[in-house]
Image (cartoon, coloured by chain):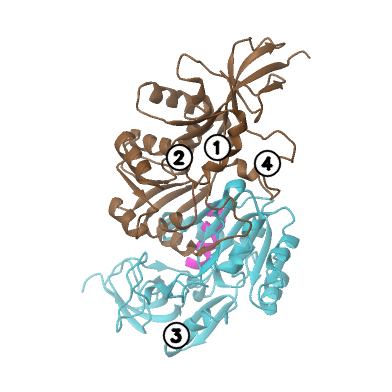
Chain colours: A cyan, B brown
């Protein structure tokens, strides 16, 4: 049909938010039904095109889900430049992942020079970019992650000022306090639960918390219990805000311009954890919840 | 000494925030020591003055604490006009109480025409003003309070659209949902705990929560536990902010101008619960935590 494009999938992205699509709990998007194609972003090559805007051979990012071939109506596609960076980055640092880090840190956490920024899930796709943008902006960056290997990566390779392995920390509040002597001005939360509880006592005046993800909760059928903390916000005049990157869609070009410059100049390093074969996508997805991945988890579908 | 003023106390204010001053837990202000004068706002009459700015007979609001006579250096006093409204209102609707409601609702909750606003502690000093300002601004106002008498007062006399007695409600979320069919755009929280838990499932998109007080927590030595809710903020793009009215000190004149107009025109009604005698101030204070008061709790010290 006129306007349609046939896509061949090169890479697909697995992300924690997809857990919400696998549940019929009320959310910001409809669930994916049993037997339907799992939703998600993919990098594709245009194989056939009846759309003058898209040429055979173009590499585009599309929200077409977990499948080897897909037909689109030619809308909602973002062309990427294979000469700037590997095409897989369109699903990671030069895509939604980088944009999430960018707006969550700069717009929601309002990070500015001299701030102390703490990020949970710091060795994950989003968290690792958050800390590096914080450094570019002149902040102190402290990451919380789940293994010594992850802590080593963010501090020795990515330039975080400090990292904490929450699995071996005997007192997370004290460990955080040691690395945040002036309190925490911004907290970028990917995780929730007890890790986030440890941040509240250390908030600085007029601090900002961005709730990006709560991966520790996504597999819970019932609400977990935790210490109440809202009283703490009063004396700290603190703000907590939940956000979705889609809310910033009008500003994506601005973010991609900065991110591309930072990636090509080496100011932002990234790691991609690639599993081979569409049939292994579920395994790659489940691994996110076991902390298997350092950096962005991708599935390579075809060349 | 030159500049000094001798004050005679007419009324003193008892407020929930004072609970924080009676504990050595870290807070935004220093605790009051044993044997020191309890801090707080009072309405006074100037008895003697060596300060050209203040004349004998002037009625002023001052932060001089719970005492019959006090000497000030003449600074930090706010003169009130006894012909505009009873002087006691300088401690209630035409003072910090009204200002707290004003900025919490309009600046923190960002209430605008058509919004549904829920307020907890709705028959309290601050809460009762919040709902009435919401109505003035064209919002739907729903109050949560602790007795049928309080619910009757806010709905029949103050013009709230609906009220819920949380002590007799069998399912607070369902009762709230019934009165907030389009969700909750703004929540002004004076109480915290299970009442606030019931609000989270009903938040509308881009909603704003103002944390003004958490009276349900102030007597707890240890952190109470409650259901985790931060994940809920993501899909709702909701914002929670703690605030102190002192942060708006530069804008107090703006608030007092509006509040005075609304009170003198009858658009805002208020109730004051006056206990007689300085010796009964502790009793009046403790009563705040038992829900004894409707409207502002004051102590009358002298005429």
Mark 2 Cα shell of 10 Å, populated few (<14), some (14-19), many (≥20): many
Mark 3 Cα shell of 10 Å, populated few (<14), some (14-19), many (≥20): many
The mark tally for this picture is 4
Depth check: give the residue in front, A231 or B163: B163
Tell me the magenta residue range: A94-109
The residue to which callout 4 is attached is B29
Is residue A17 among the parts visible in the rendering?
A: yes
Say which of marks 4 and 2 sits in front.
2
Residue at 42% x, 35% y: name it: B129
Mark 4 Cα shell of 10 Å, populated few (<14), some (14-19), many (≥20): few
Say which of marks 3 and 1 sits in front.
1
The residue to which callout 3 is attached is A281
Earlier-in-chain disc, 4 versus 1: 4
Q: In the rendered image of this protein, does residue B102 appear above or below residue A132? A: above
Mark 1 Cα shell of 10 Å, populated few (<14), some (14-19), many (≥20): many
The residue to which callout 1 is attached is B284
The residue to which callout 2 is attached is B124
**Marks 3/2: CA–CA distance:** 55 Å
Residue B229: x and y, percent? 47, 62
Say which of marks 2 and 1 sits in front.
1
Magenta stretch mostly in which secondary structure? helix
Q: Are marks 3 and 2 on the same chain?
A: no
Residue at 38% x, 46% y: name it: B147
Depth check: give the residue in front, B247 or A28: B247
Quadrant in the picture for the C terminus of chain B:
top right
Q: Chain of mark 2?
A: B
Give the SS element for disc 2: loop
Earlier-in-chain disc, 2 versus 1: 2
Q: Chain of mark 4?
A: B
**Marks 2/1: CA–CA distance:** 14 Å
**Marks 3/4: CA–CA distance:** 54 Å
Q: Is residue A10 left or right of residue A130?
A: left
């Amino acid at each position: 049909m006129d306007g349609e494009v046939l896509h061949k999938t090169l890479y697909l992205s697995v992300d924690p938010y997809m857990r919400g699509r696998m549940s019929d709990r009320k959310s910001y998007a409809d669930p994916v039904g049993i037997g339907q194609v799992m939703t998600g972003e993919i990098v594709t090559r245009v194989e056939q095109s009846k759309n003058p805007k898209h040429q055979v051979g173009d590499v585009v990012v599309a929200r077409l889900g977990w499948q080897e071939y897909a037909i689109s109506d030619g809308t909602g596609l973002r062309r990427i430049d294979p000469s700037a960076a590997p095409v897989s980055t369109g699903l990671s640092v030069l895509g939604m992942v980088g944009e999430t880090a960018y707006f969550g840190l700069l717009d929601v956490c309002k990070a500015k020079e001299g701030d102390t920024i703490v990020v949970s899930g710091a060795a994950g796709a989003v968290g690792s970019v958050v800390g590096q943008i914080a450094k570019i902006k002149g902040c102190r960056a402290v990451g919380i992650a789940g293994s010594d290997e992850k802590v080593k990566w963010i501090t020795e390779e990515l330039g975080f000022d400090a990292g904490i392995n929450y699995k071996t920390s005997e007192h997370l509040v004290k460990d955080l306090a040691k690395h945040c002597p002036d309190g925490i001005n911004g907290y970028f939360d990917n995780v929730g639960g007890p890790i986030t509880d440890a941040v509240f006592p250390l908030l600085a005046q007029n601090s900002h918390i961005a709730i990006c993800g709560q991966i520790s909760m996504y597999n819970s059928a019932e609400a977990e219990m935790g210490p109440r903390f809202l009283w703490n916000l009063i004396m700290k005049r603190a703000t907590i805000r939940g956000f979705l990157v889609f809310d910033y869609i009008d500003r994506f070009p601005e973010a991609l311009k900065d991110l591309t410059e930072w990636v090509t100049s080496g100011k932002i390093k990234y790691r991609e954890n690639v599993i081979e074969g569409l049939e292994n996508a579920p395994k790659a997805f489940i691994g996110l919840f076991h902390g298997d991945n350092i950096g962005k988890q991708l599935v390579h579908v075809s060349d």
